[in-house]
Image: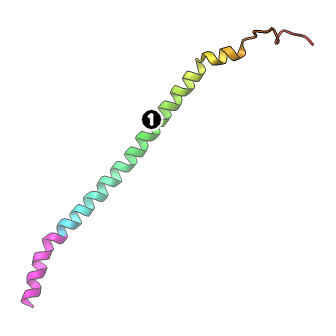
Amino acid sequence: MDKLTELIQEAKPLYKQRKRQKTMTTMVLGLSLPMIFTISLFQLYISGSEVYIALENSTLQTKLLEDEFGLLGCNY
């Protein structure tokens, strides 16, 4: 019985340390994963806005709308 008590006393700090590490890991992941997700969504929103602005100001659209051959004013 004395040997068992000695083993329990020896294992108790190791158990508490492992439990503390597991709790800290859970807290860090619990806080960092939503932050990473939010930041990535914000970056996606910003890049989408930049693409929209780039398409809005694109010379490609104006070139497509140019009437080089006079087809738009043609009455058939």
Q: Is residue 68 above or below residue 18?
A: above
Q: Image point 11% across, 81% down: which residue?
A: 7
Indicate the position of residue 52 as horizontal and vertical percent values: 57, 26
Q: Which residue is more in the foreground, 67 or 43? A: 67
Indicate the position of residue 39 as horizontal and vertical percent values: 41, 40
Q: Which residues are magenta?
A: 1-15
Q: Image point 48% across, 36% down: which residue?
A: 44
Circle 1 Cα neighbour tier, 10 Å, few/some/many (<14 / 14–19 / ≥20): few
Indicate the position of residue 70 as horizontal and vertical percent values: 81, 8
Q: Please, what is the three-letter code of the amino acid marked with disc 1?
A: Gln
Q: Is residue 36 above or below residue 66?
A: below
Residue at the farthest bottom position: 1
Quadrant occupied by the C terminus: top right
* Residue 2 is covered by the magenta coloring: yes
Residue holding disc 1: 43
Residue at the farthest front position: 69
Q: Is residue 40 above or below residue 3?
A: above
Residue 68 falls left or right of residue 3 = right
Q: Image point 51% across, 26% down: which residue?
A: 50
Q: Image point 33% across, 54% down: which residue?
A: 29
Identify the image quadrant of residue 4: bottom left
Task: Say which element carries label 1.
Answer: helix
Residue 17 falls left or right of residue 57 = left
Dominant SS of magenta comes to: helix
